[in-house]
Amino acid sequence: MNKPRIERFTFPERMTHWLTAISFVYAGLSGTALWSRKMWWTASVLGGGETIRAWHPIGGVVFALLLALMFRRWATQMKIDADDRRWLAVSHKYAIHDEAGVPESGRFNAGQKMLFWVQSVSAIVLFASGIVLWFPELMPRGLRLIAILTHPLAAVASLGGIVVHVYMTTLVVPGALNAMLRGWVTPGWAASHHAKWFRAVQRK
Amino acid sequence: MQKVAKLIDTTLCIGCKACEVACQQWNDQEFTMGVFNNTYQTMPSLAHNFWNLIQFNELEINGAQSWLMAKYQCMHCADAGCIKACPAPGAIVQNANGIVDFNQDNCIGCGYCITGCPFDVPRLSPTTKKVYKCSLCSDRVAVGLEPSCIKACPTSCLSFGTRDALHHNASKRAEELRADGHAQAGVYDGPGVGGTNVIYVLKHADRPQDYGLPKDPHIPWTVSLWKGPVKWLGNAVFFGGLLTALVHYIKVGPKEAHRDE
Amino acid sequence: MITRRDLIRAGAAVTALGFDLTPAIAAARELKIARTTQTNSVCPYCAVGCSVVIHTLGDKSRNVQPAVVHIEGDPDSPINRGTLCSKGISLKEFIVNDRRLTTPLHRAPGAAEWKPIPWDDAINKIARHIKDTRDRSFVEKDDQGRTVNRLPGIAMIGGCTDTNEINYLLSKFRFGLGILSYENQSRL
Amino acid sequence: MTNGWTDVANADVILVMGGNPAENHPVGFRFVMEARRKRKAKLIVVDPRFNRTAAVADSYTPMRAGTDIAFLGGIIHYAIENKLYHDEYVRLHTNAAFLIKDGFDFAEGHFSGWDDTKKNYDRSSWQYELDAQGHAKVDATLENPRCVFQLMKRHYARYTPEAVANICGCTAEEYKKAAALICASGRPDRSGTVLYALGWTQHSHAVQLIHTAAMMQLLLGNIGRPGGGVNAQRGHSNIQGSTDMGSWNNLPGYLKIPRANHQTLDDYLKANTPKALRPNSMNYWGNTPKFMTSLLKTYYGKHATKENGYGYGNIPKPGETENYGWGFFFDKMQRGGIEGFITFGMNPVAGGPNSPKMLDALSKLKWMVVVENFETETASFWNAKKLGDKYYPTYKDPSEIQTEAFLLPAACFAEKDGAFVNSSRWLQWKRAAAPPPGDAKPDQEIMARIFLRVRELYEKEGGKAVQPLRDMSWDYANPFNPSLEEVAREVNGRDLTTGKQVNGFGELKDDGSTICGCWIYAGSWTENGNMMARRGQEDPTGLGLFPNWSWSWPANRRILYNRAAEDAEGKGWDPTRTPIKWDGTRWTGDVPDYKGDAKPTDYGAFIMLPEGVAKLYAADLLEGPFPEHYEPVESPVQNPFHKNVSSNPMAPVFTGPNDRLGAPDKYPYVALTYRLTEHFHYWTKHVASGAELQSNFFVEVPEELAKEKGIKGGDMVKVSSARGHVEGPALVTKRIRPLKVEGKTIYQVGIPIHWGFIGRTRGPLVNNLTPSAYDPNSGTPEYKGFLVNLEKA
């Protein structure tokens, strides 16, 4: 077998993504312990309450920093254009694989772009409110009161995005996971899911 | 089990600070140097090693020189904001007798209780990274002794007993004060937090802020929102997401790459 | 029923697996004066005369060095009925205090510091000073020839925070020596 | 206190003046609060500062420090003018009816008999007019212009509300309101108490001030009554007991020190045993010979015989007019007249007036012994230049100070047993709880070892006046460390014939067959044991007397003069509050201040006084039989009543290098020093809790003065007097109101004590500022109302 391969994600892109993912999973899991006493078992698994109290913020900061790297790398590619807007308008058809009339996507489809922006905005909110919650003794009460609400709200948004993201990349689009793990896709995969990008790559 | 309570009759407070020091001594708190802030008040506010503060307020009320003094400490709310906000099981417990007690063994030092408290009482220790506050001397109460501040108070401004009995005393005292011409006298016990197990009698119940007490204490709405609707929203998003994925996968299935070479 | 001990054991098991690190640093809150020895005393500060209960370490058995661990008001006293002020309630800090003097000190004429001195030396030197001064300045008879037996060369003060008995002994001390210039805090 | 702490709860009117019990006696103050809650008592505070007592009072009247006599004299005027006094009480229980000699007069600031060259009074014109039996003549109608009542009325006629307000600085309306509240206790069914402390004693006219209070209370019929009396709260745990045990001018039990002109015991007793001035006067001091003889017999044991006047010759004797009091001997010390100085737990550099003078005086000593719990400013005075920071720049270097100093570590209260006498006169026994730290020793051991060592030196080497030293008894089971229980038994006294402890001073004899170390304590340790350690809770009268808790001098009596709570027939003025009741054969209730089985009509109620009644008029005080308003020694104004005799003409004057007085042009503000509730005297600066509660020295500055000077709260200010200065942050407050006196605006500056140059928390000694001005009768320094300047530092 010697199928032609197209590089989808570079090594630094993949590393950044997966480190971000790990920090997200850690912050998310430890965060759920802080979220609800019914989820406290995650704290036990992760080394106990004091441990997650100490490491959750650090995990969060790592996540935010890595996400900032991703942002720098991809922000320009994530601009929503006219095609994307049309894509979004017919995204329900995309969901049931009735792709007639769904505009072709570039390197990232509009859904992925939305995920990117949701995660970026959530991360900023999580980071800012997280700092406030990290050092409650140094923060004015008003800020803490805002943070204690916005932090979980942003976490919900972020988590919602990730649920969709994980489902899509693992189960709905075979090959997507491999693309992020090994970095390549087949021309057919590329042509199927990211036709515009495929053509651009081909032209090169 | 009957609820226990502390009654603070501010009309009898002379700002002697016996309660402050009794608390320090019983709880073996280290003494620190106070700061001078143009007042007789010992500390600007409560601290992790200072759980009981008399607040002094010099002001004129109806043209007369007044100097209000009132003890400030954990109010042991029935609906306690600290407990609501606390993520760590067993870190804050509400005993059957109504005492809200912090168990530092279980405390993780997140400080959510500090934000959740409508009275701004709990304090984080910079060394142990745990949160501390008045325990209403739960160790003493457990063996039938009154809290140490109560015992020390020379003028009987402080008293200890069952919540019902003290409520009765407080109302009676407020009535007495009103009969003596203090029309605004009343009882302060935080109905917004389901009632507190620390009950105040104030000569000027219309202006609790002048005693350093919040006007209408309730659990901050952001905390309530978080622990209520936001939590449900989160559950809905997470579990809803999973469910939708399941349905989608079974009904629609994966996307095949249709343009193979 | 799960007891606290069970919980600790369970915690330990989890910890052994490297997970839960719940520390057992803080001991369970137990009454710290449960087994102390209680002694009735009276506050040495102002003149209200509040009775206090001094809690000392141990049960007075032979091999225990009593140390003051806590002080509270004596509820039996009709004066304070268990209450105390901010000073009285912290008397432990007065008694157990790293600033307390624990050894006799001597400052030689012209010296710029205190130096420890054994008790016997201190007593001997003081007694010698008293005798010398007394011999130098004692007035047995005044200028009109009247017996006055007074010692103008030494002045003495104190006693107002010491007991009656010590004040009484001080009266014998001063009249024995002939000291007239004697005052205590009641003068101020 | 004439009454006691627990009795304050019986009051209807509580005047707090010259004291601040909420801050300085918080636990005692609980009885004030109880009276307010249970009896709806009115609490009236008169003070230069709106303090923590004022914060809970019904009425607060500001006043200028040092004008209390004017304030109280005004109450006397107000009570008489408005007929608010208790007429029957005054007639029955006071010397209102006594006639005074014809020559008595008051004019231009002086009473009759003033000698302007000697600066002293000839008091002969102040005496009662006596009949042939030596009894005072009386006019029961109180109409005679020479009777005390009429003289008093005339003397205080000048003290109108307007005149008083002009002196004190409040408004006449405020004054009249306060006066009406105070005089409400003049009704027979109401009682009023007075609580005072060092705000009354620390003046150059202190004794007269307290006399004014006593007069006011007598007029209102409040002496001897539950909830009445004149009550000194007192500042130290055993200041009452140490006073009872005598000072330079008293032997134990308030027996006067023998003077050089009384060479024999007989001379002494003749001069010091009063004679009854009325036929019905019990004149209990007539027993002086029994008390004195028993004391001498205690002191000199087998060396005390009838022949040698029971060793009377051994007692040191000052000359007739000599004064060996605080102000005088420190002055003498500064002039090099004293070689040695011993202090048992007292700190004159911090606590005495004019600290620079104290420091200079100590530097003139050859040797000094300090017995203490902590290192004090006095112990290390020789290092004041270094430790005292900027306050003593010209003080000598240690190398220039030749004083040999000893600092001996003493056991503290918890490490010794023995009795403290509280201000209610209750002797409360305490027990030792722990051993002293390190090598510290109990005071009695330190004292005994020094005493016995000196005696040993005399035995070996001989020397001057061996006899008084040798004769002094010291025969304790362990003479080197006398057991305080043994000493307490000796103080109580015993019958030498039977060997039994006496039950009371009634058993003392003047023939050398009884001993008693302090007659007023007789009954404190009887054959029934240690009465001071009793813990009984009973209160049979319901008046808070607690007769079985500890023991109260005299004779376990809880309310002094309690016979005055009843009328001539022995019926209580207020039937609900009668401390003693006459049941036809004997008195029940409190221990009667009267003969237990004597009929109500047999004696006057004031059995200790030769008059048999209380003295509205007291010829034995130095500056006059009636108190008169005198300005403090340093005052911003001349006395509005008599400009040429502005301050107390009898106040002693010192002329040493530190005895400078300031004038209002350079030092325009009135200053007063006081305690804060967070600290005890100069002790708690060593204690962590005190350091936490009030870490910093500060100066309380009226808001208006601060504005004038551009001072904000927390700004450093410098307060200076003619003696020295202090610096600290300003506490700018509305609580010290500017006053109007003689048309001038007077500012007062409040300066809390408690700090010094040694301690866990340090600050300036406020006595850097205070003058060497003293009361002539008591020798107490004037800490309230001296002049300072204030500027931004």
Image: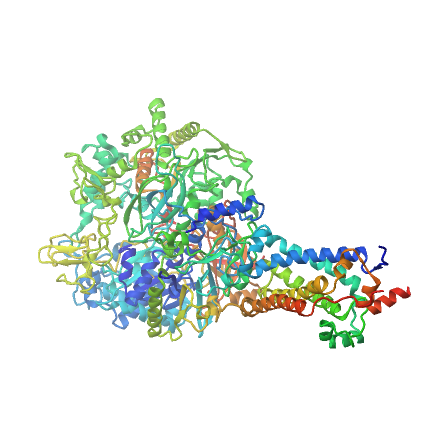
Q: Residue furthest left?
A: D585
Q: Residue B81: horizontal and vertical position, in percent? A: 50, 64
The number of callouts visible is 0
- D118 w.r.t. D503: above or below: below
Quadrant of the image occupied by residue A22:
bottom right
Would you say residue C149 is visible in this rendering?
no
Answer with left or right where residue D267 lies relative to residue A188: left
Q: Residue furthest front?
A: A1
Q: Residue D674: horizontal and vertical position, in percent? A: 43, 55
Seen from the viewer's position, the closer of residues D690 and D655 is: D690
Q: Residue furthest top?
A: D460
Answer with left or right where residue D599 lies relative to residue D675: left
Q: Quadrant of the C terminus of chain A?
A: bottom right
Q: Quadrant of the N terminus of chain A?
A: bottom right
Q: Residue C85: horizontal and vertical position, in percent? A: 39, 54
Q: Residue D198: horizontal and vertical position, in percent? A: 38, 55
Answer with left or right where residue D487 lies relative to residue D598: right
Seen from the viewer's position, the closer of residues D574 and B155 is: B155
Would you say residue C54 is visible in this rendering?
yes
Seen from the viewer's position, the closer of residues A12 and D79 is: A12
Colour scheme of this structure image?
A: rainbow
- D103 w.r.t. C158: above or below: below
Quadrant of the image occupied by residue C81:
bottom left
Seen from the viewer's position, the closer of residues A132 and D131 is: A132
